[in-house]
Image: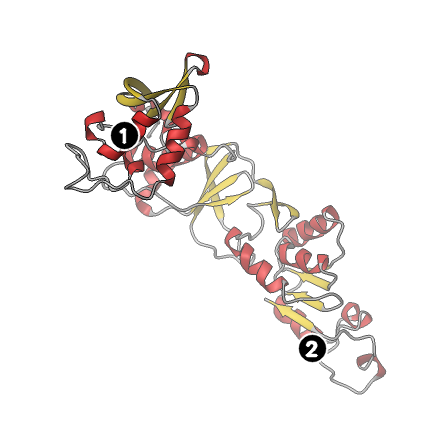
Amino acid sequence: GDRIHRELFNDVQELWAVRMPHNGAYRLRQALSKSDSGRAGTETGGIRKGPMRQNWADFILKQRKEQGIFNVVSETLGAHSLLLLAHEVSPADLPEEMQNLIAAFQGSFTRYTLVLNYHNYSYKEVLSRLLPSTITVPSGYEIVGHIAHFNLLDQHWPHRFLIGEVCLDKCPCIKTVVAKLGAVSNKFRTFDMEVIAGQPLTQVTLKEHGLQLQFDFQKVYWNSRMSAERGRVAAKCGPGEVVLDLCCGVGAFALLCARKGCLVIANDLNPDAVLFAQRNAELNKLNVTTLCMNARDLLHCAFHGELDMLDSLGLLLCDTSKSSKSSRSSKPSKIHVVF
């Protein structure tokens, strides 16, 4: 199968640089970034080769801190600093105004050798070079704690181990990379997965909206992209109100509401999800009542007063009789039913 030939990314680039006393290169870069008049066009810019550059910053090497590429470096124990010019840019290519500013900062030009290797390239750059030219780089994946979860296309599948290894290399927080096998089809909304890189550990710990959550990603339904929606809906719930979460999963939404002072009933058909919801409530020192029922059956019982637990809390969703049990003054002012 595919493997990463990291040596293919070894490269040496000879660049021009502006050499300045002490930290002058930092101050020059700041002056260039703040300048509104530093423009280079086809008529006034004096560009003799390379792509058209419109701003002074375009003549400077692009800084990419995550890949360990910096456009200002120190030399001789800080006695001098260098501002690196972009690849294939020479001093003669710089606009006259820019050269005058460099002179005002007591700068001079020198050569600099930039040494690059595999670690200086991003996930997308590495895969663009390693995958066949007809294969697109998979751009989207979900991060769940220490896990990166890919939903790969058919064209990516033969290269899944390569994709996983590069993802592992380029994302320090990732320890496990998994790929979905097939679609979500069972009643618990879980799916089969294959570990394509890293450790075969699917028990995760993560934080969402200040809550700490723990669960086994392989045993429950989880969608990180719903985080904002969970926060938005929880914001509509207030202290003393009742929340009936019919498909609570590991309890992320239910616990948000409990933290606001709501009376929360968290239900899920998946017994593993209910177990993790209970544990997460304990972990965050919050109170929720958990159930493991079919959501349709739970709604029927709640609307017809057939659950002793709901009735004892005054949580009947529908007043179906004139009995004292269904007309208590302690009933909450608002009940939220969440699917």
* Position of residue 289 in the picture relative to residue 33 (left or right): right
Q: Secondary structure at mark 2?
A: helix
Q: Quadrant of residue 156?
A: top left
User: Residue 29, how many percent across, how many down?
Assistant: 38, 32
| Residue bearing the label numbered 1 | 100
Q: Quadrant of the N terminus?
A: top left
Q: Which mark is residue 303?
A: 2
Mark 1, secondary structure of its residue: helix
Q: Nearer the viewer, mark 2 or mark 1?
A: 1
Residue 273 locus on image (x, y percent): 63, 53
Which mark sits nearer the N-terminus, 2 or 1? 1
Expressed as whole percent of the image width and height from the top left, the position of residue 218 reads 55, 45
Residue 114 x/y as whole percent: 32, 20
Q: Quadrant of residue 229?
A: bottom right
**Label 2 to label 1: alpha-carbon separation:** 79 Å
Residue 333: tell me if it is visible. Answer: yes
User: Which residue type does callout 2 highlight?
Assistant: Phe
Q: Is residue 119 something that shows in the picture?
A: no
Work out which residue is located at the far top of the displayed protein and give it: 76
For badge 1, the amino acid type reads: Asn
Q: Nearer the viewer, residue 64 or 226?
A: 64
